[in-house]
Structures are given as structure tokens and as C-alpha cells.
Amino acid sequence: MAFVNRSPWIHQLDQSRAALTLSSDTQTDVAIVGAGIAGVATAFFTLHETNKKITLIEGGRLAHGATGHNAGQVTTYFERPLHDIAEEFGPELTKEGQEAVEHSFELLEHMYSIANLSIPFSRFRGHAGIVDFDRVISHLKDNEMREKLVLSVEEFLIAENAPFLKNIPEQYVRFYTVVPQQKIFDLLETSDPRFIACLSSQKGCINSALFCQEIILYLQKTFPTRFSFYEHTHINKVVLKQDHALLDAVHHEIHTTRVVLCTNGFETLTIINESGLDINTRFHHTIKGVIGFMSGYLKAHEKPPIAISYIVEGDSQFEGEYYYLTRRQFEQEGNGNYNLISVGGPEVVLEDTAFYTKDQDYPEEAQESIDTFIRTTCENGEKKPIEYQFKWHGLMGYTTNGIRLIGTEPQNPVLLYNLGCNGIGILPSIYGGKRISEILAGKKLSPSIFDPKNPQ
Ligand SMILES: Cc1cc2nc3c(=O)[nH]c(=O)nc-3n(C[C@H](O)[C@H](O)[C@H](O)COP(=O)(O)OP(=O)(O)OC[C@H]3O[C@@H](n4cnc5c(N)ncnc54)[C@H](O)[C@@H]3O)c2cc1C
């Protein structure tokens, strides 16, 4: 039987919400292409920061891309060690970049409260469990870098029975605390003896697709004359002129002064620059992608929300670098309160993201890998079969340096980007929305690690 990609986030959307499709040529100040969390946040902040007319165009349905197929953990780290980013960009830009993502928690809360939302959104201290010396050292280096950059140092616990305790260089002593292993087990909610260190930081969880839906409803109500939203309207081509752009929406055209791509990649459209050098999208984004596989099961609501990463590699060909578990309050068909426990980790590299489809197979080995992990590490040796109500996968497309691309295209400022999914994108997308709105409002911004660069 063909696999049905069933994500709990899309399951919670209002399936009866009417979708409007573009039915004539149109003219706007800012066209935003792509209605995942990046496009929605960009629309939100631009409507608030400027008095411009905004048109948001989505090729499929709202939030049915990565935003509807993620793990929904709200986290502030990059998928590269901070000390590595500092080597590429220098201390000042790295500090500003990290702070920008950390402050985006407040931007998310701001959106939530301005739109008067009541959907579940939790903030808490989350944890990452570590099993090996190399990772311990890498995270200690990051803590050292955090101190250097005057960022808050993260709490780092190492078990007193960790075999490498004596090998940790003296310079890192002030960045960790030695504790009984049981303390680490308690934080990671496991008794899996492999875990000998734990890093804790601010995290949260939200259904980012439901969040998008609610924000759109708010924008439509609040800005009826300045905001238009079209779904099932694919943009084939973006033609850039000197001071405006033309979007080819198959049957119709959109004339716009600026265009913001929030498309999570470049593979779905062609960009033609008629005012300047060609834009080499390969320079900005890798063609390769990663499919992340996830499963979720429901339990009676008994524990508070949590997000935990378990940095341990499994032994199947589908293993990623870690498993990630999120537990949250979940409402299922109005039928009481549940805990939804969702777990991801297995992944597969796709040589060309253009070949990804939402309905492609979910390999049995990926499911087995999640199942074994849950039984051994989270459910502490549970033997009974686990019934998964949800099984889904999503595509992570990568920028070349693993950092989201936010800003103006150097070859033609009519075009802007807030894209590059990467495995962590909820807060960076929101920050991107805010930063783009400031550019569109004419503010002069200082350089950042997120700036699109010219090809060398
Ligand atoms: C398995 C998985 C787990 C993840 N877990 C987390 C996590 O726990 N925490 C976290 O922060 N991030 C996570 N992420 C990443 C996060 O989901 C993404 O970074 C974020 O959702 C990206 O949002 P977006 O709006 O940029 O992209 P998308 O949500 O993919 O939206 C892009 C939209 O653009 C539309 N589009 C594309 N091309 C066109 C076109 N030519 N015309 C019109 N529309 C177009 C698409 O249809 C799509 O709706 C995960 C991702 C995956 C896949």
C-alpha cells in the first residue's frame, strides 16, 4: 500500500478553510512567494512595519511544506558549532547572529500576543544527551566561545563515571559540572547507560503549521485592503527589472516593486535578471537535501511539554546525527487532552531536492530505527508494540554554509530572500521575516551572517 504522509501538524489544520486562487493579473508593492512560516512571518512584520500592499502567493496549500512536516521544536542553536561559525564570520557577527535567533523567541511571543492566539505554545528548558568524548569537547568549545562573545554559557553536566573525565583539558573546567549519572538520566528521562553528559538550554514547542494558519486569519481580518493571500498559485518564473519584477503565475502575471522568496529553495522557479548579472542560485543553496523521518504516538496527558535531543548514532543506514523527541499537549478531534510524543532522527540524503515528493516511501528500516530508539531510550525497555497515529517525513534543503539566507540579492535589490530550510528553521524564519520587513521599511541594517553574498 502506498505510504500516506500523515503529520500531526497538518492534521490539526482547519480542512474546511477556503483557499483563494489568483484569478486575474495583479499589481502589488511586495510579493512574497511561499506560505510556510518564513512567508507568513515576512508578511506579518512587513504589514506592521510598513504601509505597503503585500501579496502572499503559495503554490500548494498554506504551511504544507517543511513547516507542516517538522518536529516543531523551537530551538536557538545552529546546525554548526558556534566556534566554527566564529571562525568563518568573526566574533562580532557571530554574537549578533546568535543573539538574533535567541531574541526571536520574543518575536514569536509578540506575534502570538498581537494576533491574540490561544493555540498551544510552550517554553521550557530542553536538554541534549551526549554519549561520546568528541561531542563533549565540541560543546565545551562552544561554551568557551559563548563566554568570549559575552553570551550566556549553557548548563553542561557530565556524569562522575564518564570514562574520559580525566582527559578533559583544564581550560574547560569552568564550563561544566560533574554530577551523579542519575541526575543526567532524570533530565533526559531515560535510564539508558550510554548517556554521560547533558546540555540544557531554552527551548519550546509549537505546531508551526497551525501557527501560520492562525496568523493568516489574523492578517486577513486586520489588513483587508493591504493584504492578499493566494493558494494553489505556482510561480514559474521571476523576471527582475531595474526597479520592479514580473512574476509568471502560469495563467496570470503579478507586477511588483519587490519580491521576497520564502520558497525554502530555488528548485521550483526560474529567476531571470534583466538588470545586472545572472543570478546563480547554486551559489546560494545546495542541490542536495535531506529527508527527515518522524513518527508520533499519543498517551494520556500526564507530563509537561519537553524537547530532548539524544546525540547518538544508530546502526542502520538511515541514521542521522541524533534522535529528537518532543512531548506536548495535543488535542485530537476535540477528544480530551493527550500527550503527543513525536520522535525523529533517521534521514536519507537526496542527491537532488527537486525529486522529493511528499508521498514517497517511508522505509521500514527508518521506522524500525525510531521504534528501537523509543523502546530502549525513552520507554525504558518497553516490549509492547507502540501504535503510531502519525508517520511523516519532510525535506530539509540546505544553504551552502548551513545558515539561513536573509536579505537582498546582491545582483538586484528588487529580489530578497528569507529561505534555506536547514534542520532548524522556525526561529530563523521568524527573525528573517522581521529583518526583511526592516529592509523593506528602508532601514539601514548592519551586515550579518545571514546576508546573501556575491559569488566569489
Ligand atoms: C523532518 C524535519 C524536522 C524539522 N524539525 C525542526 C525543528 O524541530 N525545529 C525547527 O526550528 N525547524 C525544524 N525543521 C525545519 C523547519 O521546519 C523549516 O526550517 C521551516 O519550516 C522552513 O519554513 P519555510 O517557510 O522556509 O519553508 P516551507 O515551510 O517549506 O515553505 C515554503 C513554501 O513555499 C512554497 N513554494 C515553493 N516554491 C514555490 C513556487 N515556485 N511558487 C509558489 N509557492 C512555492 C511551498 O509550497 C511551501 O509551502 C525541520 C524540518 C524537517 C523537514
Image: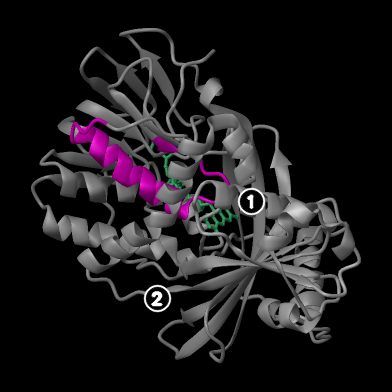
Q: Could you tell me residue 352's position as x and y percent?
A: 65, 32
- Mark 1, other Cα within 10 Å: few <14 / some 14–19 / many ≥20: many
Separation of marks 2 and 1 at Cα, in angstroms: 35 Å
Mark 2 and mark 1 residues within 8 Å of each other at the beta carbon: no
Give the residue at mark 2. Answer: 120
Closer to viewer: mark 2 or mark 1: 1
Above/below status of 134 relative to 13: above
Q: Which residue ends up furthest to the right in the rendered image?
A: 163
Q: Position of residue 92 (x, y in %)?
A: 47, 37
Residue 95 circle label = none
Q: Residue at x 32, y 66 (%)?
A: 16
> In the rendering, at what x and y percent does residue 2 appear?
67, 57
Asked whether 426 falls inside the magenta stretch, the response is yes
Rendered image quadrant of residue 259: top left
Residue of label 1: 144
Is residue 261 at all visible to an observer of this figure? yes
Q: Is residue 222 left or right of residue 275?
A: left
**Colour mapping used in the image:** one colour
Extent of the magenta region: 418-444
Q: Amino acid at mark 2?
A: Pro
Residue drawn where x is 54% and y is 64% of the image: 7
Marks 2 and 1, the one that precedes in the sequence: 2
